[in-house]
Image (cartoon, helix red, strand yellow):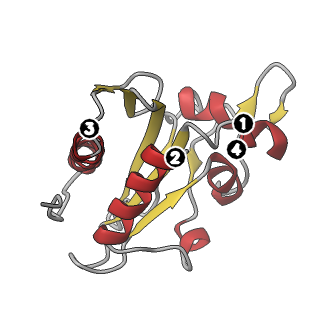
Amino acid sequence: MSIEERDFASERELEDAVGRVASDCLRKAGKSAVIVRGYGLDLAVFSQVGCFFFEVKAFDPGHGRCGFGNQKGEGNQIRLLFDSGLGRPRQSEELALFNRSIRWILGDRSKQHGAARYAFFTSQQAQAAAAGGVRPGKQNNLRISAFEHDWVTWAGLIDRVNNFLLNS
């Protein structure tokens, strides 16, 4: 049985749902797994097939933005996308090193339950979608419009999470 889509009122609720999807996927594949919240990114999945990290964002049209890091431009997401030692955004080749273990998930609360309202993307795509570029010292936000051709339904998101966990 697949995890049923539920409306999510918060990022935390979407994180819970993604955690259930990951756990269900690995259990069905006969793999042991431990899921830890807030271990670097929102969710860390440690399993027999590898270690995986998810940064989960929920866009609420009432807020008008989808921030990452904190308001001061600090946090693990910023460190992931910006090399503070060199004072520049990480280069694409550096971000590509994260592709086997990190994915970002965005849920758009402005779209109806059952609609294509989820994006599953890499750190390169996150960096490219950052409004005004990623930089410490400022509020960093994702441009929702950057994903206009990438939205999938809940079933599509489950497929992408399962494929990532089992085929990375």
Which comes before the other along the chain, label 2 or label 3?
3
Residue type at mark 4: give it.
Val
Q: Nearer the viewer, residue 71 or 87?
A: 87
Report which residue position mark 1 lands on.
Answer: 97
Q: In the shown orientation, is residue 127 left or right of residue 145?
A: right
**Which circle, 2 or 3, is nearer the viewer?**
3
Spatial CA distance of label 1 from label 2 is: 12 Å
Q: Secondary structure at mark 1?
A: loop
Q: Secondary structure at mark 2?
A: strand
Spatial CA distance of label 2 from label 3 is: 22 Å
Image: 79 above or below 114: above
Image: 116 above or below 15: below
Which comes before the other along the chain, label 2 or label 4?
2
Residue type at mark 1: give it.
Leu
Spatial CA distance of label 2 from label 4 is: 17 Å
Question: Would you say the residues marked 3 and 4 are in contact, meaning their CB atoms lie under 8 Å apart?
Answer: no
Residue 146 drawn at (x, y percent) = 61, 69
Give the residue drawn at x 40%, y 50%. Answer: 57
**Which circle, 3 or 4, is nearer the viewer?**
3
Instruction: State the quadrant of the C terminus.
Output: top right
Report which residue position mark 4 lands on.
Answer: 134
Residue 18 drawn at (x, y percent) = 29, 48
Q: Secondary structure at mark 4?
A: loop
Give the residue drawn at x 65%, y 37%. Answer: 98
Q: In the shown orientation, is residue 10 left or right of residue 120?
A: left
Report which residue position mark 3 lands on.
Answer: 30
Residue type at mark 3: give it.
Gly
Q: Quadrant of residue 58?
A: bottom left
Instruction: State the quadrant of the N terminus.
Output: bottom left
Q: Nearer the viewer, residue 105 or 96?
A: 96
Residue 151 drawn at (x, y percent) = 46, 74
